[in-house]
Amino acid sequence: MRAAVRRPLNVVVLVIGAGIFATTLVWWMVPLTLVTYALLVFFASRDPIFARRVLYGHEDADSSSPTADRDVSPERRARWLPRGETREKVEAALVVYRKVVVAIEESDEVTRAVLDDAVPKLHAAADRLVDVAQRREKAAEVLRDLDRHTGASGTREGDAEALQERLRAADAEISDTFDKLLALRSRVVRVSIDSGNPEGAATLNASLDELNARLEALSETMTPPETPSQHR
């Protein structure tokens, strides 16, 4: 909590708000600035990436996806996927992800300060997207094995239906991630145009938190059951 209170992003909000009030003497800027600052402190104190950075250092915070190798980019991991529609969707989403990162890194100093946590969250989302795609392809492989052994056991039908549902959920989430990354890119542009609008930054970070949570939850549910050959 102390680190969240002293966080540069949050302090910048107070400075900007005080500067606008001193220039315009608009009274409602004071409560607006204080409320925005309080929300940023609240969200930062509950952000696991920020917490790891404070408790264990910057290097550990960057390793936000335990299932991904930090030395391998998500784009390279995506190229290991089987050729097909899933890989095409993931690669298209990663193109947008990289453009969002570049847009933040090439923005002005105020915008970069306001979006301080957005870049590691984007990296985490990209890695988790590839995790979901990899497990989706593994589940599809298991489903094909189940289809080849439909006569082996009646209980396999329930497994097949469950896998079909997981595949549909993964396909929908992968497509949705592409759309969400496009929306994030436009939000970064708006934050930059508005000289580091803290409310826009808070909304962007909240969207990234939701995206990471959805991808992580889906990845955990994508572990497929054993194939019939594994029961022998």
Image (cartoon, rainbow, N blue to C red):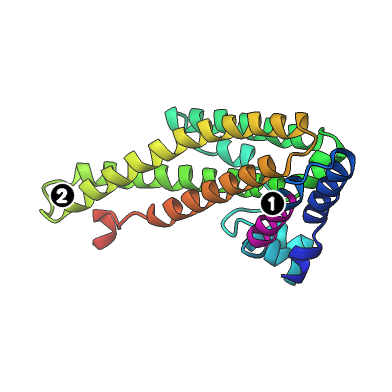
Numbered disc 1: secondary structure: helix
Q: Which residues are magenta?
A: 33-44
Residue displayed at 74% across by 50% down: 33
Q: Position of residue 163 (x, y in %)?
A: 28, 47
Query: Is residue 140 in view from this perspective?
Result: no
Disc 2 residue type (three-letter): Glu
Q: Position of residue 143 (x, y in %)?
A: 28, 44
Q: Position of residue 102 (x, y in %)?
A: 75, 33
Query: Is residue 60 in view from this perspective?
Result: yes
Numbered disc 2: secondary structure: helix
Residues at marks 2 and 1, CA–CA distance in whole angstroms: 52 Å
Q: Which mark is residue 12?
A: none
Q: Is residue 162 above or below residue 232?
A: above
Examine the residues drawn in magenta and state their main secondary structure: helix
Q: Position of residue 125 (x, y in %)?
A: 58, 46
Which one is nearer the viewer's eye here, 181 or 2?
A: 2
Q: Is residue 167 above or below residue 41?
A: above
Decide if residue 161 is on the left or right side of residue 12. Answer: left
Residue 74 in magenta?
no
Circle count: 2
Which one is nearer the viewer's eye here, 101 or 111?
A: 111
Q: Is residue 92 above or below residue 156?
A: above
Asked whether the beta carbons under mark 2 and mark 1 sit within 8 Å of each other, the answer is: no
Residue 40 in magenta?
yes
Task: Answer few, some or many: residues within 10 Å of disc 1's Cα (few below 14, many 20 plus, some between 14 and 19).
Answer: some
Quarter of the image where the N terminus is located: bottom right
Residue displayed at 74% across by 39% down: 197
Residue carrying label 1 = 36
Disc 1 residue type (three-letter): Thr
Residue carrying label 2 = 157
